[in-house]
Image (spheres, helix red, strand yellow):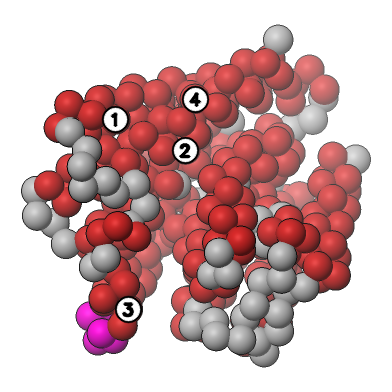
Amino acid sequence: MDFILAICGLVLLLIAGDTLVRGAVNLSLRLGVPPLIVSLTIVAFGTSAPELLISIQAILRGVPGLALGNVIGSNIANVLLVLGIPALITTLHVTDNSTRASYLQMIGATALFIILAHLGPITWVSGIILVTALLAMLLHAFMSARNHRNAAAACEDVTELEGADPMISWWKIVAFIIVGLIGLPLGANLLVEASTNIARSFGVSETVIGLTLVAIGTSLPELATTVMAALRKQADVAFGNVIGSNMFNLLGILGVASFFGSMPVEPGLLRFDIWVMLAVSLLLGVFVLRRIDITRFWGLVITALYVLYVIVVVS
């Protein structure tokens, strides 16, 4: 029964997150907010709302290990699974990729988190540092977009903005926002409670459930986006989706969640999982910095690496 409830909670989270993004994007555009600002803020925050709500609910329920496990596991899944599966469908061409600067920022965010994790529990002080770093990166992205006409022109194309619909009615916008605001906390509460029960029934920690079951589930939106980008031959979108999600997971989700309670870092995470996250992040750099296409062969390799990681964690 707990597995069914977990799946229901996950589905509710994904649906609510998508409807909230659609409602917020179209409301902002109707109110005259530039699409560039919408894409850098509302879309980025909205698509990560499920992970954020799960982390907050986990802390409030006294299982902070689930919150940390979700973020670390999601970052690992984003690189190995979210890029690996699309590469099995079609080659991800990195020749014209322009995500080098964003990738280096992601490595910086990863290094900052590892340092804070080794200094002790993730507290509100750590949260201020993480959120400040996120705001600095968002400001840099905004300024870079303004300084490059091509990037600005692409962002100003309303039809290309995730969830934008120039013909949508006001009542649909309001309905999307209401469904999203109600569905997100309900789905998060359901998924966290069911996942905690599953962990206890199998004798494993909530952290392990966060690293595997919850992490895979909350990475599904990124996987769907990356598959579509791969089919459209948009490698920049695919890589940017993964890099942006990983940065926001570490800086935004953990930063905001820490304001709701302290998150002790389990020894197992410090010994193994954090370093796996760093290793797969550096592995991504091999393709981004050296402009190596992720072919079906590499897709098979990195997907197999993720399967191996899950087996090790669960066992």
Q: What residue type is labelled 1?
A: Phe
The kind of secondary structure element at disc 1 is: helix
Q: What element carries label 2?
A: helix
Q: In this view, does 123 lie above or below 283?
A: above
Mark 3 and mark 1: Cα distance apart in space: 29 Å
Q: Which of marks 3 and 4 is nearer the N terminus?
A: 4
Q: Please, what is the three-letter code of the amino acid marked with disc 3?
A: Ala
Looking at the picture, tell me which residue is in the foreground, 280 or 145: 145
What range is drawn magenta here?
Answer: 145-149
Q: How far apart are marks 4 and 2 (CA)?
A: 10 Å
Q: Does the magenta stretch include residue 148?
A: yes
| Residue occupied by mark 2 | 50
Q: How far, Cα to Cα, is label 4 from label 1?
A: 13 Å
* Residue 260 visible somewhere in the drawing: yes
Q: Which of marks 1 and 2 is nearer the N terminus?
A: 2
Residue placed most toward the observer, 263 or 213: 213
